[in-house]
Amino acid sequence: MHSRSNTTSRTRTRRAARAAAAALAGALAFSLTACGGDDGDGGNETDGGANETASTVTLPKLNGETLEVAAVWTGPEQANFKKVLQEFEKRTGAKVTFVPAQDPIINFLGSKIAGGAPPDIAMLPQVGAIKQAVDKGWAKPVGAEAQEQLAKNYSQGWQDLGKVDGKQYGVYYKAANKSLIWYNTQVLENAGAEEPKTWDDLLTTAQTVYDSGVTPFSIGGADGWTLTDWFENVYLSQAGPEKYDQLAQHEIKWTDPSVTEALTTLAEIWGKKDYIAGGADGALQTEFPASVTQTFTGGDQPKAGMVFEGDFVQVNIAETDAEVGTDAKVFAFPAVGDTAPVVSGGDAAVILEDSKAAQALATFLASPDAATIQAELGGYLSPNKNVDPSAYPNAVQQEMAKSLVAAGDDFRFDMSDQAPQAFGGTPGKGEWKALQDFLKNPKDVKGTQEQLEADAAAAYGN
């Protein structure tokens, strides 16, 4: 069986999600529907907040040193992260090159390592990928300075997610709240639709939007991870945290009745082609960024009125004329069971080529300094509890950040990201492919479960 990082991590990630749900719900009730857009703090200037960021971490002089950092980030997300790397260069004298990677990043890194040219650091988007990098002998533990920053700035749960067999390999630089549904404000207002609190309410809102002449949902089905996020939110809320953890560890099978129930629930939306922009075929040809922009392009007659995904959607909304908090608003993923779900994700910096410079960059990424720079640029959340919420560019993100920190260790990490990458993180295979097939044919619940179980059994080795 493909084991998780360690016993401590497993225990902490199995804590009840209720505290996080309550914290998030309170924040959402206050800000996500009522606040304005950018507060004008200048965070979107070319230099970001780099020149004004107070130093809280001591870094060595690294004149003449070079580093490569690989990540799958593209577009504004990549551009914003490069500003963080530029600040590191400014403080140390090192030269850092960003290396665009492809999914699955483990395969990409394998080819680079085989060719004798591994990046110094990789930003890994899955807990399972960290474990694989350690098992393959690629990953190197972070040093005392980075561990000191982690101890000061991170809850134990976020630290433990980056551990394998008790050693710290990952620095979780980026977090995500993956339990949000964004909507075109004018569409819902024109339809007379309200923000839903429950799954049944969501179905009512969808029908109301449809009756007004706008397709309810945009789905980026070409990227299988968006579909796993749909499933995880339904499953966590409906089956509960204990079952969620069991399924994440493959301690129960994907043929379990709880999975039947979740897929049947999903089919209440996925099974109505008129509810999805372009129908299933169109959704499966729509990549995630386009699923967002088409929701907020076209005024009150966009291709869809709502799009489900995490806080990072704001980066894509910024590419349209819509403003977060006014034209684009957000509500928490509705409760399917007794409690609304809170699913988190994140990206961890992992050292592949150990050096003084690589350790220094890992230390910087674990500090509030690095996270504050990217926080000011928007479309980003940090699990670093010592980032001042005022660094985020609008009240929406400020409240999301406060909720993330307030949740402490009480969250559930993205299920597919905990799985072996062959099952939970590979385009055209495993969970991604099975749910894409299910989107195409949502009547085939049994066949989908059988395929999921076969793929999971092969990947987990049991």
Image (cartoon, rainbow, N blue to C red):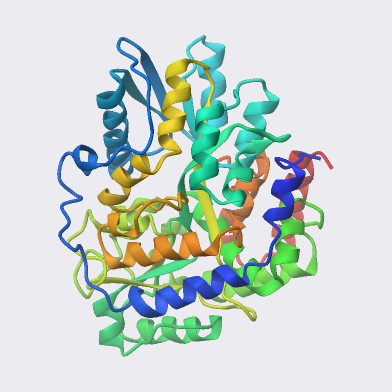
The residue lying toward the viewer, choosing from 356 and 336, is 356
Percent position of residue 457, x then y:
79, 45
Name the quadrant of the C terminus: top right
Q: Nearer the viewer, residue 378 or 409?
A: 409
* Position of 270 relative to 53 (above/below): below
Residue 157 percent coordinates (x, y): 61, 51
Front-most of residues 145 and 375: 145
Judge left or right: residue 205 versus residue 146. Answer: left
At horizontal 36% and vertical 82% (from top left) the residue drawn is: 209
Q: Quadrant of residue 95?
A: top left
81 to 44, vertically: above or below: above
Whether residue 176 sits left or right of residue 259 in the image: it is left
Left or right of 302, for residue 179:
right
Q: Is residue 348 visible?
A: no
User: Against 88, is 158 above or below?
Assistant: below
Q: Residue at x 15, y 40 (%)?
A: 46
Q: Quadrant of residue 66?
A: top left
**Front-most of residues 426 and 315:** 315
Q: Position of residue 165 (x, y in %)?
A: 73, 34
Q: How many marks?
A: 0
Whole-percent x and y of residue 428? 57, 42
Q: Which quarter of the figure is the N terminus placed in? A: top right
Residue located 61% across and 36% down the image? 129
User: Looking at the image, can residue 41 be seen?
Assistant: yes
Q: Residue furthest right?
A: 462
